[in-house]
Image: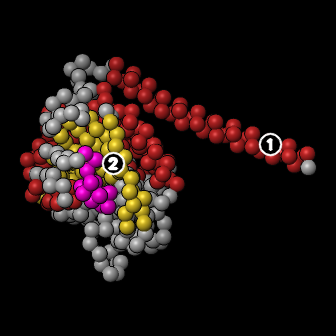
């Protein structure tokens, strides 16, 4: 009995050591991330008074999300990543709101919704909304085996990563003449697969639908909303999405022209794209905010999206820091010019 008890204490001790080691490693990662960019900020050319979008920093935020695994509602990975995003955004934003509720999915599942909103310059009436979804898809419906969840390195994590890096810059270099709100919306990708019967409408974008009906501030409005979705993939191409052009052509022109000016025209193709059902649709339709979608959707592809879309292959191997750099630099530059 004594030997057994001693063994149990040894096992408990080893577990505690491992937990402390993991916590220390996590803290070291965060501190190293901050130290790296403090050094970089000191070395910036003085003319770039508003800082420079850093793809390595964005990739750090992306990799961190993916490290939790698929961020599907009703899973531990979803809970852990949500807590991480609240903690991270709280380091940068003036104020952070959390929306927690329950929504019903197409198949009757009850999903715990967790929208996270970071507010910058909260007293300014002129506002811009930036948004991306942080959840990942519950099924790989584009694979032969549809039973697994999608890791979502590009479809979800990339947009959030770009916004977190923009948030880091806004903390260090505040924009005085506009207010900016960063909405990390949830339950975007829990929509019905194509072959689901009976067919149902509006099963995607549950988090943005909820926010549009219940904004974090009463009577909230914004001059524009910019949605980022699948903005980190290799060989990404961003066409002018059809609804975006219809409701906010001036902003689409500004962003695509800025991309060409900065040398990123190879990503931002100034050509007409097709309509995509995404968060911008509901932000415009329900909240009446002109919204655009920057999304890797190429009309010449069989399904428009990258070939790894909604499959097990949506992982870090398909992420390109150059794409993160292009999207982040363009969006951040347009914000500065507003």
- The residue beneath circle 1 is 9
Identified at 18% across, 40% down, the residue is 127
Q: In the rendering, at what x and y percent does residue 224 appear?
A: 16, 46
Q: Is residue 331 left or right of residue 103?
A: left
| Magenta-drawn stretch contains 176 | no
Q: In the rendering, at what x and y percent does residue 147 appear?
A: 48, 70
Viewer-side residue, 204 vs 53: 204
- Element class at badge 2: strand
Please identify the quarter of the rendering in which residue 182 is found. top left
Disc with the residue nearer the chain's start (2 vs 1):
1
Viewer-side residue, 69 vs 11: 11
What is the chief secondary structure element of the magenta stretch?
helix
Identified at 11% across, 43% down, the residue is 254
Q: How many numbered marks are there?
A: 2
Viewer-side residue, 104 vs 290: 104
Q: Is residue 63 left or right of residue 131?
A: right
**Crowd rating for badge 2 (residues with CA inside 10 Å; few <14, some 14–19, many 20+):** many
- Element class at badge 1: helix
Provide the residue span drawn in magenta.
205-217
């Amino acid at each position: 009995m004594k030997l057994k008890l001693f063994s149990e204490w040894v096992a408990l001790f080893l577990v505690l050591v491992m937990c402390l080691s993991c916590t220390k490693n996590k803290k070291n990662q965060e501190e190293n991330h901050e130290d790296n960019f403090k050094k970089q900020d000191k070395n910036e050319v003085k003319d770039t008074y508003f800082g420079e979008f850093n793809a390595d920093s964005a990739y750090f935020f992306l990799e961190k999300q993916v490290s939790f695994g698929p961020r599907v509602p009703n899973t531990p990975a979803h809970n852990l990543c949500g807590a991480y995003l609240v903690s991270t955004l709280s380091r940068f934003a003036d104020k952070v709101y959390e929306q927690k509720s329950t929504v019903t999915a197409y198949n009757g599942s009850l999903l715990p919704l967790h929208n996270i909103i970071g507010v910058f310059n909260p007293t300014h009436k002129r506002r811009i909304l930036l948004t991306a979804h942080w959840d990942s898809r519950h099924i790989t419906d584009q694979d032969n085996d549809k039973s697994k969840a999608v890791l979502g390195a590009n479809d979800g994590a990339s947009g959030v990563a770009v916004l977190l890096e923009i948030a880091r810059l806004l903390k260090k270099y505040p924009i005085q003449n506009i207010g900016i709100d960063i909405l990390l919306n949830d339950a975007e990708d829990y929509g019905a697969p194509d072959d689901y019967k009976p067919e149902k409408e509006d099963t995607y974008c549950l988090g943005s639908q909820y926010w549009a009906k219940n904004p974090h501030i009463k009577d909230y409005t914004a001059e524009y909303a910019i949605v980022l979705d699948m903005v980190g993939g290799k060989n990404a191409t961003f066409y002018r999405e059809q609804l975006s052009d219809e409701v906010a052509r001036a902003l689409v022109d500004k962003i695509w022209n800025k991309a060409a000016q900065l040398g990123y025209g190879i990503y931002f193709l100034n050509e007409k794209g097709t309509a995509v059902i995404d968060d911008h649709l509901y932000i415009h339709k329900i909240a009446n905010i002109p919204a655009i979608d920057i999304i890797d959707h190429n009309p010449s592809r069989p399904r428009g999206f990258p070939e790894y879309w909604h499959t097990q292959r949506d992982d870090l191997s398909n992420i390109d820091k150059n794409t993160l750099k292009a999207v982040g630099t363009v969006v951040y530059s347009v914000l500065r010019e507003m």
